[in-house]
Amino acid sequence: MSSLAGQISIVVGNYFLLKPLDGKGVIGSNLNNTKLRTATIYGAGVAGLSAAKMAIAQGFKVNLIDINEHKLNSAKGILNSNNASVMLYQSYNLEEILKSSDLIIGAVHQGSKKASMILTNSDLDLIEKGSVLIDIAIDQGGCFASSKPTTHDHPTYSINGITHYCVTNMPGAVPLTASEALNNATLPYIIKLSDGIEVALKSDKFLYHALNFEKGKLVLEEVLQ
């Protein structure tokens, strides 16, 4: 679902950059050597990397920012594009990046914890009107100070001429694709469980970590906290 949300962020980002929707009037494109538009993505995890790959394919220049150098090095090899720049959160030039960005995507994720705040309200002053902010982390509380949950029926709102898209459960926009992807991902575990729950839990560490209750007791540490 995280990977799917990353892909959706580029689709809706392109859409809300359209001029009739109060966007800049640009789109990610390699058409006739037009200027590459810039997508800045916070978070090099599953969602952020998925967004970066699709953004590059759509013709964006991509800035991928994270606090984890190992993730960034891995992302650099995966993206393998001259149109992708990876940078540590502690070292990048905030003002320069935000001023040049058409699409800004927050894809930070910290497990069961609340998402880290990466943009303040005052940072909006650095962003050009007509730009689009997409907060994939809104399900974990959001990673932009200006974020508030929205719905698929009313997906956006504007602050200082900047479109905010903060839809909770973004994959809900593509339920058939989401269901098929989820079924394909979970089927191998269902097959393992069919051999017996205890056998499956002992043989698969991922299944064991997903165990919430055992013999009537709550055992999942993240939930216990």
Image (cartoon, rainbow, N blue to C red):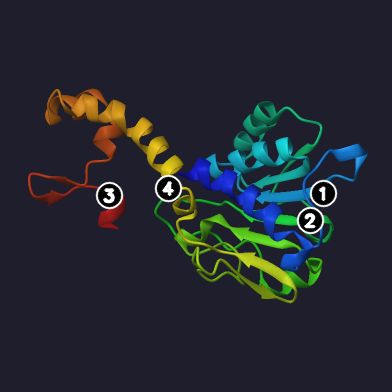
Please tell me whether mark 1 sits on a helix, a strand or a loop: strand
Q: Earlier in the sequence, mark 3 or mark 1?
A: 1
Mark-to-mark CA distance, 4 and 2:
30 Å
Q: Position of residue 195 (x, y in %)?
A: 14, 23
Q: Earlier in the sequence, mark 1 or mark 4?
A: 1
- Residue type indicated by callout 3: Glu
- Residue type indicated by callout 1: Arg
Q: Earlier in the sequence, mark 2 or mark 1?
A: 1
Mark-to-mark CA distance, 1 and 4:
30 Å
- Residue type indicated by callout 4: Pro
Q: Earlier in the sequence, mark 4 or mark 3?
A: 4
| Quadrant of image for the N terminus | top left
- Up/down of 121 relative to 69, above or below: below
Please tell me whether mark 2 sits on a helix, a strand or a loop: loop
Label 4 or label 3, whichever lies nearer to me, is 4
Mark-to-mark CA distance, 3 and 2:
39 Å
**Residue on which disc 3 sits:** 221
- Residue type indicated by callout 2: Ser
Residue at 12% over, 50% down:
217
**Residue on which disc 4 sits:** 175
